[in-house]
Image: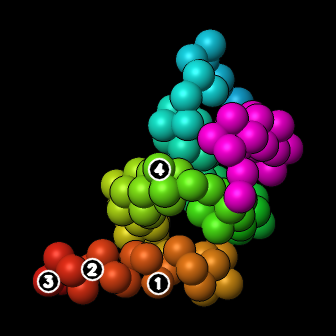
Amino acid sequence: MFTQLQIINLLKNELPVVAGADCAVVSAHTFNSIHSSIHYLSACTKNTMEHRHFRAARRCFSLAEEVYREGDTMVKLLIENVFVYANVWTKARNTPSPLPADIVPDVLYKIHLKQLNDSGC
């Protein structure tokens, strides 16, 4: 299990490599907390989808899956509620064409389906 600080450092080091220009804007506060770091991961992922950089999007989703699997309870909740529910899926639904099925890891897709079922959609 990774600590929150380890996850922050992982995202800080990996996101610029994974998503490149889609993650170019970084403020001084981006990696101050696990919450802001997950928001940034979400924003980078949305940007990759918006620009149809599906290879980078796949890598962002894989990074989110790794963080979800290795994180503590707070990290899991942030991935479920910030990354999956609040941000990324909104963008995915608004993408002109459907996302290629192999972009989203099964773990995250199952979370999304559970959220839809729980909400009655």
Q: Residue furthest left?
A: 120
Q: Amino acid at mark 2?
A: Leu
Q: Which residue is mark 3?
A: 120
Q: Is residue 72 above or below residue 27?
A: below
For the residue labelled by badge 3, is the local secondary structure a helix, a strand or a loop? loop
Q: Which residue is mark 4?
A: 74
Q: Position of residue 62 (x, y in %)?
A: 71, 66
**On residue 83, which mark appears?**
none
Q: CA distance from mark 2 to mark 4?
A: 21 Å
**On residue 110, which mark appears?**
1
Q: Is residue 94 left or right of residue 69?
A: left
Q: CA distance from mark 3 to mark 2?
A: 6 Å
Mark 4 and mark 1 residues within 8 Å of each other at the beta carbon: no
Mark toward the start of the polypeptide (2 vs 4): 4
Where's the N terminus, which quadrant? bottom right
Q: Which residue is mark 2?
A: 116
